[in-house]
Amino acid sequence: MPVDPCRSPSGRPVEEYLEVAERTGAFRPCEIEVLREVLTDAFVDPAKGYCFLENRENDRIEAFAVFGRAPMTEWAWDLYWIVVDRSLQGRGLGRRILGRVEEAVSASAGKAILRVETSGRPEYEGQRHFYLRTGFRETGRIPDFYEAEDDLVTYCKFLSGGLAPEMAS
């Protein structure tokens, strides 16, 4: 039986995840379209390297994350998307799904570097503070990367012993 490219491993349609992301108010339409492509790739072809986790309660998507191994690295991973339903933000769901991501990446090699790239726009201040509160460090910034006055901001978190002790959370 062929895989339905519009459904997650749990059988839910991609549109459900996009609706949760749209309701956050955090993403521009072009970002939602990229999320559609990433989710479709993650669901249809796991060989593309995307990993997917979700939290559900009573068949409702509360939060989800998409992440994957950084190419040409031994233990580096990228967190591509972390989304928490807007009505549930501030209740620890982001921390919980991030914790599950960290467990998954750490289990792969016993240690890991988790990298996040995000926008420097003022509207993303909450997201940037979330990463700082959860042990990430800002490790880079490229001014005007996305457009004028929208920097690319990179955060990293070093998981487990042996990696950059001065940066470990």
Image (spheres, rainbow, N blue to C red):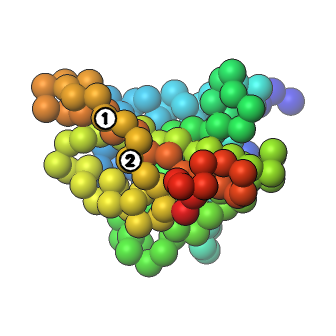
- Residue 73 visible: yes
Q: Nearer the viewer, residue 16 or 74?
A: 74
Secondary structure beneath disc 1? strand
Relative to 22, is 30 above or below? above
Amino acid at the residue labelled 1: Arg
For the N terminus, the image quarter is top right
Residue furthest to the right in view is 1
- Residue 18 visible: no
Amino acid at the residue labelled 2: Glu
Residue at point 22% right, 28% down?
Answer: 143
Residue at point 46% right, 35% down?
Answer: 35
- Tell me residue 150's x, y (percent): 20, 33
Residue furthest to the bottom in view is 91
- Tell me residue 46's x, y (percent): 75, 31
Question: Image quadrant of residue 51?
Answer: top right
Relative to 125, is 80 above or below? above
Residue at point 81% right, 45% down?
Answer: 109
Relative to 97, is 141 above or below? above
Can you identify the residue that label 2 sits on?
138
- Density class for disc 2 (Cα within 10 Å; few <14, some 14-19, many ≥20) is some
Residues at discs 1 and 2 in contact (Cβ within 8 Å): yes
**Res 128 label:** none
Can you identify the residue that label 1 sits on?
141
- Tell me residue 13's x, y (percent): 59, 44
